[in-house]
Image: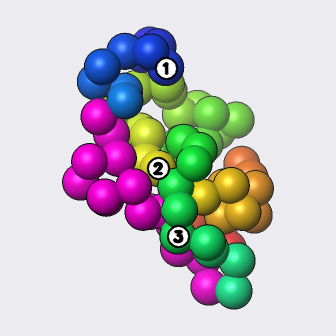
């Protein structure tokens, strides 16, 4: 499990340039201010670096505990 203060966790947005990785049409503000679990925690996803991506609050809320292809 990775902690939110861990330097590796804080480095996640670098490949995205602080842009939202989800970019849900009609919802996205593009400014990543939250973290999204690629495999939702409610569906067995873990708090690990390879399961985290930056997301804007609006996209993250819209996605909820679904996979991106379920939207």
Dot 2 alpha-carbon crowd within 10 angstroms: few under 14, some 14 to 19, many 20 or more? many
Q: Name above or below for residue 64 compared with residue 68.
A: above
> Residue shown at 54%/42% (left/top)?
35
Classified by dominant secondary structure, the portion drawn in magenta counts as loop
Where is residue 7? Give x, y as percent. Answer: 30, 19
Of 21 and 46, nearer the camera is: 21
Where is residue 28? Give x, y as percent. Answer: 62, 74
Q: SS at mark 1?
A: loop
Tell me if 5 is positioned left or right of 13 in this view.
right
- Label 1 vs label 2: CA separation? 13 Å
Which residue is farthest left? 15
Q: Mark 3 points at which residue?
A: 30
Q: Would residue 52 be visible to someone looking at this image?
A: yes
> Residue shown at 68%/55% (left/top)?
57
Of 54 and 39, nearer the camera is: 54
> Residue shown at 35%/47% (left/top)?
13
Q: Name above or below for residue 24 compared with residue 19.
A: below
Where is residue 14? Give x, y as percent. Answer: 26, 48
- Label 3 vs label 1: CA separation? 21 Å
Q: Is residue 22 magenta?
A: yes
Q: Name the residue under label 2.
A: 54
Q: Give the range drawn in magenta.
A: 11-25
Residues under numbered marks 3 and 1 in contact, where contact means CB atoms less than 8 Å apart: no
Q: Would residue 63 be visible to someone looking at this image?
A: no
Q: Earlier in the sequence, mark 2 or mark 3?
A: 3
Q: Which of marks 3 and 1 is nearer the N terminus?
A: 1
Of 46 and 4, nearer the camera is: 4
Q: Name the residue under label 1.
A: 4
Where is residue 53? Give x, y as percent. Answer: 43, 47
Q: SS at mark 2?
A: strand
């Amino acid at each position: 499990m990775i902690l939110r203060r861990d330097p590796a966790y804080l480095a996640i947005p670098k490949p995205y340039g602080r842009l939202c990785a989800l970019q849900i049409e009609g919802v996205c503000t593009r400014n990543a201010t939250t973290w999204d679990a690629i495999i939702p925690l409610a569906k067995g996803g873990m708090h690990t670096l390879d399961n985290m991506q930056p997301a804007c609050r609006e996209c993250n809320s819209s996605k909820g505990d679904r996979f991106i292809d379920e939207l």
